[in-house]
Image (spheres, rainbow, N blue to C red):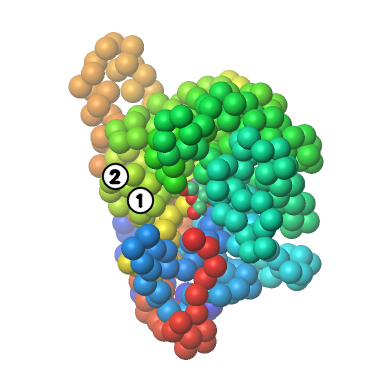
Amino acid sequence: MQEEIQKHNQASFTRVSEAFDFLANKLTKNGLDVGNILSQLSGFQVAIPSWALGAGGTRFGRYGIGGEPANLEDKFHDVGLIHALTGCAGAISLHIPWDIPKDTLAIKELAAANGLVFDAVNSNTFQDQPGQKLSYKFGSLSNVNKDIRDLAIAHNKEVVDIGNALGSKSITVWLADGSNFPGQSNFRTALDFTAQSLQEIYQYMPTDWSLFIEYKPYEPHFYHTVIQDWGTSLMLANACGNHAFTLVDLGHHLPNTNIENIVSTLIYQGKLGGFHFNDSKYGDDDLTVGSIKPYQLFLIFNELVWGLEHNIKNNPAPAWMIDASHNLKDPIEDLIQSLDAILIAFVQALIIDQKALQTAQMNHDVSLAQEILQDAYRTDVRPLIQKMRASKNVAIDPLKTYRTMDIRNKLIAKRGVNSRATGL
Ligand code: PSV
Ligand code: MN
């Protein structure tokens, strides 16, 4: 793999060097430390969700893409491939029970062989499993029935055990709990039960673990959702303790919400635990990162970079994860594009002239402040990313290399045209 990537890189070295030198020269003149930017870029790793390697679907249907990874081993192969191409996908986030490792030791070895570590493990109490005696239809951690709550709590504890055996250090809890009709549920009771259930899971976690609480305003329920927003998540995290945090999924906001403001507030409180990257036009569309609102992504990264540089409450490094669904595109291509978009927004945020911005803010110079941000956003930073990739011996242009190597057809030949990944 490495050798073939190098072969494809050969033709681009001169072009990359020239473009990099030109940009590096400009940035250095602006007082930026290009070496430092390259090293931050090089260290940036984003977890790939085990559930996003096959074709996604909607309630109207699903079209397979062929060669999908039908078991956990194949999923590791695909994430390893993305990592070998991009150099920034060195972690995997497992969803249980979609991906229960049968042989923990063998899976750990497989991960290590592909250069992967285990990011947050995800529990699933939004679907009933075959043979499950009690149903989550009317809620899981928030259910009025104690036996159902206990079942959901026990599942989360089991996920912690599985993650612990693999070397993961965090669990993400996303609840589908809510109601469809006014009167169906008592909001306060549901929230109170959720708080108690989360506290029990939190107490069970090893002390070096983190609990990430993901919020979402609607879907699958359409009237009320128990953990509807970042404020509710933050409140629940605070009630659990120091190792509980809020997780921001970019698609989990009502239209036009100022997500960068939320990010800033959470870091201010030291409570931003993790990120699910995706993009959307209307709701939780789970589209390729940066495909619809790249400027918003940049503004979010501005808050992330600035907030973590002025980290007054010691917010731990957030867990970066992609949470997308690929209905039309080859999932591997889609994930490569998402990783590119994340890196681009990250570097653009790193090159913002923060001193000049602060001065403009102090002087109430609104136009200049806007110009400073947009100057960074309008800079083509791709030569920096390509330079980093060339020096890491990964693909300078991962998507092109993936296509030239004809990888999807090779996967179809190996796994079959009808192989299907587990997940939603
Ligand atoms: C829910 O929409 C969500 O964002 C949660 O993170 C789930 O774990 C994931 O999607 C399932 O696809
Ligand atoms: Mn999510």
How far from the left and from the top, in percent, is residue 29?
34, 37
How far from the left and from the top, in percent, is residue 347?
40, 44
Dot 1: within a 10 Å radius of its alpha carbon, few (fewer than 14), some, or many (20 or more) residues?
some
Label 2 amino acid? Tyr
Asked if residue 405 is positioned above or below residue 313 in the image, the reply reads below
Q: Which residue lies furthest to the bottom in this view?
A: 413
336 on left or right of 124: left
Task: Name the residue located 61 percent from the left edge and 51 percent from the top edge.
Answer: 135
Q: Which of 304 and 151 is in front in this view?
A: 151
Say what secondary structure mark 2 lies in: loop
Q: Can residue 36 be seen in this view?
A: no
Q: Nearer the viewer, residue 222 or 56?
A: 222
Label 2, on which residue?
282
Q: Tag on residue 285?
A: 1
Dot 2: within a 10 Å radius of its alpha carbon, few (fewer than 14), some, or many (20 or more) residues?
few
Q: Is residue 61 visible?
A: yes
Q: Which of 33 and 293 is in front in this view?
A: 293
Asked if residue 221 is positioned above or below residue 370 in the image, the reply reads below
Label 1 amino acid? Asp
Residue at mark 1 to residue at mark 2: CA–CA distance:
7 Å
Task: Name the residue located 49 percent from the left edge and 61 percent from the top edge.
Answer: 424
Q: Nearer the viewer, residue 293 or 302?
A: 293
Q: Is mark 1 within 8 Å of ligand 1?
A: no
Say what secondary structure mark 1 lies in: loop
Task: Name the residue located 38 percent from the left edge and 46 percent from the top edge.
Answer: 284
Task: Name the residue located 54 percent from the left edge and 67 percent from the top edge.
Answer: 422
Badges 1 and 2: C-beta atoms under 8 Å apart?
yes
